[in-house]
Image: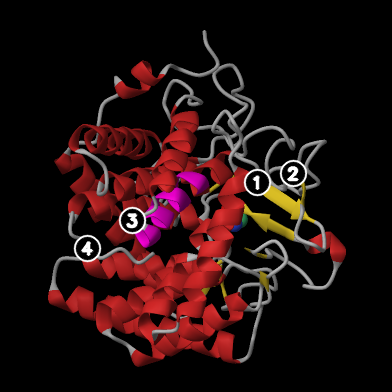
Amino acid sequence: MNKWISLEQVMAHEEAALPELRGAMDSCVRQVLNNLPAFEEHFPDANSEDNFYTPGGNPYRIDDWTSGFWTGEVWLAYENAAGELMKAHLKAVGDRQVETYLERINKKLAVNHHDMGFLYIPSCVAAYKLTGSARAKEAAVKAADQLMTRYQPAGGYIQAWGDMNAADNRRLIIDCLLNIPLLYWAAQITGKPRYREVAERHITTALKYLVRDDGSTWHTIFFDGEGNFLRGATCQGYKDASAWTRGQAWGVYGTAIAYKNTGRAEYIEYFKRVSRYFLTHLPDDICPYWDLSFGNGDEDQPRDSSSSAIAACGFLEMSKYLPAAEAAFYVSAAKKLLGSLIRGYQVTDPAVSNGQLLHGVYAKSTPYNGCKNAGVDECVIWGDYFFMEALTRLLKPDWNVYW
Ligand code: GLY
């Protein structure tokens, strides 16, 4: 038994067919509707406990970066629901939730970090694109301004966390590739080029250092005060030199969006390298373990189903810009990943879970990473969201991307 199956074996898996995709989305919309009474004005935490999310505020807690995904699920349900009454109800809930993001950014509640894209794109940028809401636009532009305060000119990157003047905090992380699209959106909406300039500096710096020669990725890169590269490290992966699965998936989707926003050919090459590494480090059922150093024979380790959903979104995004044969390959890969998620990981019974995808991991402690266990083998709210996004992309080929 090989730890990872070959690319040919991955591509021999069964794609999710159209009726399967439709059934999966119908089930997701039902689950969002089931959750509305408890989560109309409340938000789930980053992960479930025993497969159930509990309602909290926006922010849920002081380090909350994830509430946007629940509002994003509401908007995706709105886009996919059948029936005007149901749609009107979902829109009303989405609009009410937008108010909490405006209040959050106005009061600067738990926004002193780089995750403004994760928070404000699926919630407020989505609301603006779908409904033209001026309140959503105001909130998202203010969030982009907040993100701009994280820019470190020495080195040219957005600093992930912590005090901007503390030497230990001079780091970027791969996840930020999904926060950067907020700056491109703000540049377009306001006509101010500075957002785009910062976005491009960050992407250039990030990809230069994050992608290793073999196509695997670092989670995090440290710099000195002059902006010189110091070292790569992990925060949530198994160990520094391993490839944290979700980081790799952020790399797949992040490079696809970087290409969408810049048209730079080198980002296609980065995308292909990180995608190949992802697709060649999968176990038999093609849903990855939480770190890509694990595979068949490591059944004591948990999967991270959310990474599969994120990577599928990246494959589908990049397929729009590739020649036909390459595009077909990535669309097919996305359908195969989704087939595995639908058949083995999707919640189909609300008595089992109020999430969408079982078997995700937020953070897993190892002797090498300094993490505490959080949401190990649980639903994770971004996994639920990106699963719905990937299904939407396949069901609505002209879908107006939120990112
Ligand atoms: N952005 C943090 C994570 O992916 O867990």
Residue 219: numbered disc: 1
Q: Nearest the camera: 50 or 380?
A: 380
Task: Please say if the residues under marks 3 and 1 sit with CB atoms less than 8 Å apart.
Answer: no
Q: At 77% across and 37% down in the image, what residue appears?
A: 366
Q: Secondary structure at mark 2?
A: strand
For mark 2, what is the residue? 233
Q: Secondary structure at mark 4?
A: helix
Q: At 28% across and 37% down in the image, what residue appears?
A: 335
Residue 202 image-quadrant placement: bottom right
Spot occupied by residue 213 in the image (x, y as percentages of width and height): 59, 31
For mark 4, what is the residue? 80
Separation of marks 3 and 1 at Cα, in angstroms: 24 Å
Nearer the viewer's eye, disc 3 or disc 2?
A: 2
Identify the amino acid type marked 4.
Answer: Asn
Scheme of image coloration: secondary structure
Q: Nearest the camera: 209 or 73?
A: 209
Nearer the viewer's eye, disc 4 or disc 2?
A: 2
Specify start and end residues of the magenta stretch as a single range.
251-262
Separation of marks 4 and 3 at Cα, in angstroms: 10 Å
Image quarter for ligand 1: bottom right
Residue 389: numbered disc: 3
> Quick check: is 153 in the magenta stretch?
no
> Quick check: is 259 in the magenta stretch?
yes
Task: Please say if the residues under marks 2 and 1 sit with CB atoms less than 8 Å apart.
Answer: yes
Q: At 43% across and 82% down in the image, what residue appears?
A: 97
Spot occupied by residue 151 in the image (x, y as percentages of width and height): 65, 71
Q: Residues within 10 Å of mark 4 (few under 14, many from 20)?
A: many
